[in-house]
């Protein structure tokens, strides 16, 4: 039986975190994905309570003041945060929880938990490819893409703060390396925690 873990998946916007997490959850229904709160407007098709808890800025600030968020950060003009309750409940029930969050939030989580954490930084094959993915996704304005790319450079520079660095080039290879990071190397391809680095 696997030990309970808090899995922190970080990487620049557009690198493919959400794409990989969807496949991971299909293959590992035991894993619980934390649904974040955000002040960002919903994109077409996004569902309140499923993709995010979409809050007004005042509601978000009230949640911070009430201590309801495990971590939070301002990112590209909006607030994002992890509701504490779901993580505590799942953790208490012995379930591993996956947080898909940006760098400042990941740092806050690592400052609060220690041994139970597996931290993973997902990298694009290149910054040009990251930009291509953000544009091809077609979900963000030019201004938003520019903010996300500027932030990406800072985030990539912090990749070695994480236990694992995984390059999302071939999706299936990255998925297998993610499984290795979370579950160990017994049934998955090996990913060296010290490499690859960008
Ligand atoms: N290995 C890959 N090769 C090519 N395209 C990919 C790969 N992985 C993901 N993509 C594409 O890149 C785009 C961005 O992926 P995704 O939305 O999963 O990124 P993200 O990291 O979750 O972004 P955000 O943090 O903004 O939510 C999507 O269009 C997705 O289909
Ligand atoms: N610190 C946190 N970051 C979060 C959280 N939920 C999502 N995110 C990160 O925000 C950016 C932008 O997301 P998008 O959905 O607007 O593209 C991305 O890096 C997410 O990983 C959170 O709860 N806390």
Image: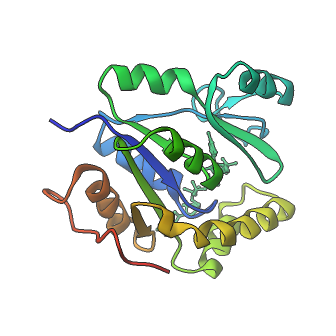
Which quarter of the rendering shows the N terminus?
top left
Residue at position x 55%, y 25% in the image? 84
Residue 117: x, y in percent?
Answer: 39, 45
Q: Is residue 136 left or right of residue 30?
A: right
Q: Residue at x 81, y 59 (%)?
A: 144
Residue 119: x and y in percent read 43, 53
Q: Nearer the viewer, residue 48 or 192?
A: 192
Residue closest to the eye, 115 or 26: 115
Tell me which colouring the rendered structure shows: rainbow
**Residue 80 against residue 83 in the figure, above or below:** below
Q: Is residue 31 left or right of residue 110?
A: left
Direction from residue 21 to residue 148 in the image, left or right: right
Q: Where is residue 63 drawn, in percent x and y?
A: 72, 23
Q: Residue at x 36, y 20 (%)?
A: 92
Percent x, y of residue 91: 37, 26
Q: How many marks?
A: 0
**Which of the 4 image quarters holds residue 35?**
top right
Say whether residue 142 is left or right of residue 28: right
Residue drawn at (43%, 19%), measured in percent from left and top? 89
Residue 119 against residue 27 in the figure, above or below: below
């Amino acid at each position: 039986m696997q030990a309970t873990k808090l899995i922190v998946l970080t990487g620049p916007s557009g690198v493919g975190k959400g794409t990989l997490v969807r496949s991971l959850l299909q293959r590992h229904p035991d894993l619980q994905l934390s649904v974040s709160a955000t002040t960002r407007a919903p994109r077409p098709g996004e569902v309140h309570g499923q993709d995010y808890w979409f809050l007004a800025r005042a509601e978000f600030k009230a949640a911070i003041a009430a201590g309801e968020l495990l971590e939070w950060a301002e990112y590209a003009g909006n607030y994002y945060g992890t509701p504490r309750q779901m993580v505590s409940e799942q953790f208490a029930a012995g379930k591993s929880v996956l947080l898909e969050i940006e760098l400042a939030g990941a740092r806050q989580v690592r400052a609060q938990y220690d041994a139970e954490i597996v931290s993973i930084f997902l990298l694009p094959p290149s910054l040009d490819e990251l930009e291509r993915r953000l544009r091809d996704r077609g979900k963000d304005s030019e201004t938003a893409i520019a903010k996300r790319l500027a932030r990406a450079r800072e985030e990539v520079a912090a990749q070695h703060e994480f236990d694992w660095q995984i390059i999302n080039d071939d999706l299936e290879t990255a998925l297998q390396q993610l499984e290795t990071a979370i579950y160990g190397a017994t049934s998955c391809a090996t990913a060296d925690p010290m490499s690859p680095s960008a």
